[in-house]
Amino acid sequence: MDTHQERTVKIEDTIAMLQKTFECPICLDLMKNAVSTKCDHKFCRLCIQKAIGHKSSIPCPICKDPTTKRSLQKLTHWNKIMDKVRELPSAFEADSGIQCECN
């Protein structure tokens, strides 16, 4: 059987994995207002828009396919999931009374 400490570590590892999954490859934080490129890479809207700047297109930061502001697609479902992922550490702390080491 798992001890309380082992379960806590598993929960923290799962939260950390979720945070990593939804991490922007530009700012390395949980994505905010996530968008997808035509090549299906995901970024914070602000991060990729700053990267594009005033240029008509840039190479995708991941695969180098052409990326334009116009081609960015809002990821409504991802944004809802990320809102919940952001809440996980504080929910874990509230439930367990243990400070989450996953932030």
Image (cartoon, rainbow, N blue to C red):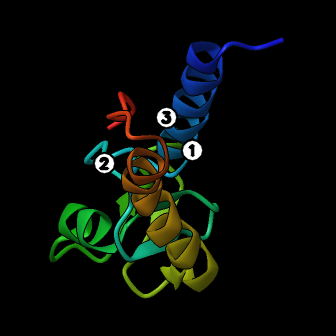
Task: Residue type at mark 3: give it.
Answer: Ala
Residue 39 rendering spot, x and y as whole percentages: 63, 61
Residue 6 or residue 50, whichever sits in front? 6
| Disc 2, SS | loop
Residue 37 rendering spot, x and y as whole percentages: 54, 68
Task: Residue type at mark 2: give it.
Answer: Asp
Q: Which mark's residue is nearer the viewer, 2 or 1?
A: 1
Residue under label 3, please give it: 16
Task: Residue type at mark 1: give it.
Answer: Leu
Give me the C-alpha separation between circle 3 and circle 1: 5 Å
Residue drawn at the location 30% of the way across and 48% of the way down: 29
| Disc 1, SS | helix
Residue under label 1, please give it: 18
Q: In which quadrant of the rendered image does the C terminus lie?
A: top left
Give me the C-alpha separation between circle 2 and circle 1: 12 Å
Q: Earlier in the sequence, mark 2 or mark 1?
A: 1
Residue under label 2, please give it: 29
Q: Residue furthest right?
A: 1
